[in-house]
Image (spheres, grey):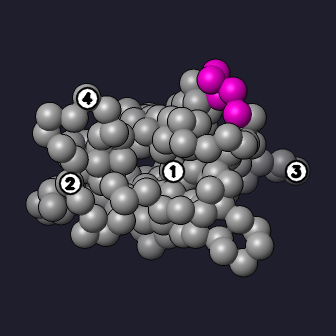
């Protein structure tokens, strides 16, 4: 009797979604980044670790710096392309940051801080946000990486164009 089904041949896909609830603690983003890397390694997606960790780090740090309550990291397959990984962070503030709106402002080249969400926009294959005004509260900022290179090749780990 087999208790573990073999994984399908081909590129490793995420077979579920992982969620980590985090307290408003300065150590929480680092703990979440470590878990993110561990989950990617367990799923055989180490080639995505650097980009996913950068995306998660920026989203987690934004939640920690700009909210006062708990937040959560969510990691799972991409919405359209299951070969991608989606890194999402929920926090209790329903306002979408201006730096994360599609068509929103670009980062100030001379700014000393406030560039994190612009990095997410640059390095993600896709990104977006949802506000929950229906009483659940908060927002979810998400970014995906690991899709096919827009220039026609395989997975590309550099900044997205546009």
Residue density around tag 2, few if under 14, some if 14–19, many if 20 or more, within 10 Å: few
Mark 4 / mark 3, whichever is N-terminal: 3
Q: Which mark is residue 158?
A: none
Cβ–Cβ under 8 Å for marks 4 and 3? no
Mark 1 / mark 4, whichever is N-terminal: 1
| Residues shaded magenta | 24-28
Horizontal side of residue 105 vs 67, given as left or right: left
Q: Residue 28 placed where, x, y %? A: 65, 28
Horizontal side of residue 53 vs 43, given as left or right: left
Marks 2/4: CA–CA distance:
14 Å
Q: Residue 79 placed where, x, y %? A: 50, 69
Residue with the mark numbered 1? 87
- Vertical side of 93 occupied by 24: above or below: above
Marks 1/4: CA–CA distance:
25 Å
Q: Residue at x 53, y 62 (%)?
A: 95
- Vertical side of 59 occupied by 127: above or below: below
Residue with the mark numbered 3? 1
Q: Residue at x 22, y 47 (%)?
A: 107
Marks 1/3: CA–CA distance:
36 Å
Q: Residue 147 placed where, x, y %? A: 33, 58
Q: Residue 136: which quarter of the image?
A: bottom right
Q: Which mark is residue 112?
A: 4
- Vertical side of 138 occupied by 30: above or below: above
Q: Is residue 27 magenta?
A: yes
Mark 2 / mark 3, whichever is N-terminal: 3
Marks 2/3: CA–CA distance:
57 Å
Q: Does residue 10 appear in the picture of this structure?
A: no
**SS for tag 4?**
loop
**SS for tag 2?**
loop
């Amino acid at each position: 009797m087999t208790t573990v089904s073999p994984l399908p041949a081909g590129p490793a896909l995420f077979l579920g979604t992982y969620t980590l609830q985090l307290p408003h603690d300065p150590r929480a983003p680092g703990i979440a980044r470590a878990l993110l890397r561990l989950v990617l390694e367990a799923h055989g997606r180490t080639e995505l670790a650097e980009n996913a960790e950068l995306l998660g780090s920026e989203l987690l740090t934004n939640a920690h710096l700009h909210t006062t309550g708990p937040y959560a990291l969510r990691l799972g397959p991409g919405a359209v392309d299951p070969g991608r990984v989606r890194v999402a962070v929920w926090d209790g503030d329903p306002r979408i940051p201006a730096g994360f709106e599609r068509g929103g402002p670009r980062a100030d080249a001379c700014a000393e801080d406030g560039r994190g969400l612009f990095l997410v926009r640059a390095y993600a294959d896709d990104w977006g946000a949802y506000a929950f005004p229906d009483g659940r509260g908060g927002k979810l900022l998400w970014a995906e990486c690991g899709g096919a290179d827009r220039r026609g090749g395989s997975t590309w780990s550099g900044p997205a164009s546009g």
